[in-house]
Image: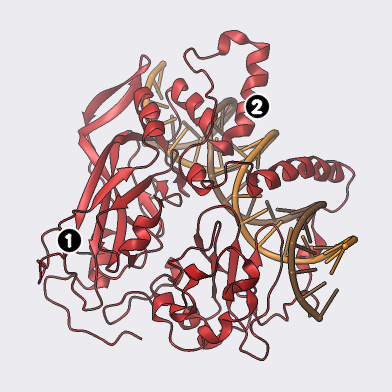
Chain colours: A red, B orange, C brown
Amino acid sequence: MNSPVPLPQCCLPLPALRREMGIHQPVGYYMPPQCCPSPRPPPTPVQPAAQLENKELWERFNSVGTEMIVTKSGRRMFPEFSVSLSGLEPNLPYTVCVQAVPEGDARYRWRDGAWGKSGRAEPGPPTRLYVHPESPAPGHRWMERPICFSKIRLTNNTLSQGGQIVLQSMHRYSLRLYITPTSTQGCPPGATVSFTFPETSFIAVTSYQNPKLSLLKIEENPFAKGIKFFKTQQDSLSPQKRVAGSEPEGESSPGCKRMRESGDGGETGSEKRAQETHRVSGESAEKGEKGESPTNERTKMEPTEKNGNDGRDGRHFLEGTGRSHRGQEGGPPLSMSVHYGSVAQRLAWLPPAVPQGPLGPYSPAASVPGYRFAIHYYGNIPPFHPGACGAPLHSLGPNLSANPWTSGQFGPCVSGPYPQLSQHILPPPSLYLPPQAPRLGI
DNA sequence: TCCTCTGGCACCTTTGAACTGA
DNA sequence: ATCAGTTCAAAGGTGCCAGAGG
């Protein structure tokens, strides 16, 4: 796809870089600051800028003293780290990374209801960069909406795989964002810029120390709703257990979720589904008590002609409808799933639909036997979508039937090389093999 | 004894995918 | 046969807690 291009010496080759920086996700090239001075002045005087999206929430946590759980298998961050970018060159590809930077040189300890320093920091492994899975992508895409790093996982396991940031418990960190311009010429036209967000300062812990903080997490994190309910029950039995100064807020879970829901002020599809699921969960629990098999036999059902999946074509799915689509009649089988709905884009990898895979030249993942890729979209079809070999997707409008991704016109669009697509679709980190040449994607 | 870490638990949300009816 | 809505379970996320280990 991309022909090999000689690298300037100041650019670290990917494998070496990965080793050095602890990067376990595919990324074209990481440019250290001051590396590769721009061969030409930037066309616009605007400097890249980054703004913390859910700043208010971060500040609330910060005022209490943010703690982040680290576990062996990796724990997500809450609040989620999300930023809005501006000042990027619209058509220049950028790689966006996050790093947890150690703050100070101390180890911390929770004592007498407050965090205090407790000796010097212990030497730990160099912190890894987490590369946003959509990297690299053109500037206009990064600027179009907030970038959400919801998939970051924090761990204290130094042997963990990619996609996780290794931290030491009882040490303080803050998040730093890196924006690296890249180009097809192998050397970026500009240097990496970084942004630090003091509001994101946190102490890595294996269990929460500050009860006010844990209460705030329970209040704000939708996944902790069960705990919230449980606590409420407990508190009603023993009101003296309540932690002072923890008034519930009117609106819960700002941050990435709220951003995903932007655009429609009403109830989202996922919320609706969640309510349904809640109800259904009770039913299934009853079934379990009755001794019925908890296994859903339907999920084991073989693909059929009826539902549009003969086991060879990757299907397009529309969130909430489960509608399946074939590729264009007579065309090649598709190897992509596309998921539309109400929230943000997500890239995901699926196990092979056909054990004997590979899925042919229609998947950029063809080089990774046994895997096919999936692009899940939640929200309006983004105008920057890389698919269809340059088809003007922004002209498609909200009518899904007019969308080549779901109408069958997509197949022929990806039958050739798909350079645009390749910039966005990356193989699963665990199967990623570093390329021999500079790359923008696969 | 104290501090930190780990694994299991119950409860919840999210996601994937089949079913159903128009 | 196709399309769109509904239904359901698995997967995965949450904090809490008891116990282990240094």
Q: Are marks 1 and 2 on the same chain?
A: yes
Task: Name the disc covering residue A44, or none.
Answer: 1
Please identify the quadrant where the C terminus of chain A is shown: bottom left
Task: Name the disc covering residue A229, or none.
Answer: 2
Residue A96 visible: yes
In percent of width and height, residue A318 lies at: 65, 63
Q: What kind of element bears circle 2?
A: helix
**In the figure, is residue A272 to the left or right of A243?**
right
Marked residue chain, label 2 = A
Above or below B12: residue A94: below
Task: Name the disc covering residue A31, or none.
Answer: none
The span from disc 1 to disc 2 (Cα, nearest Å) is: 53 Å
Crowding at dot 2, Cα within 10 Å, few <14 / some 14-19 / many 20+, comes out as few
**In the figure, is residue A357 to the left or right of A134?**
right
Residue A131 visible: no
In percent of width and height, residue A433 lies at: 38, 76
Callout 1 amino acid: Thr
Above or below A305: residue A98: above
Labels 1 and 2 touching (C-beta < 8 A): no
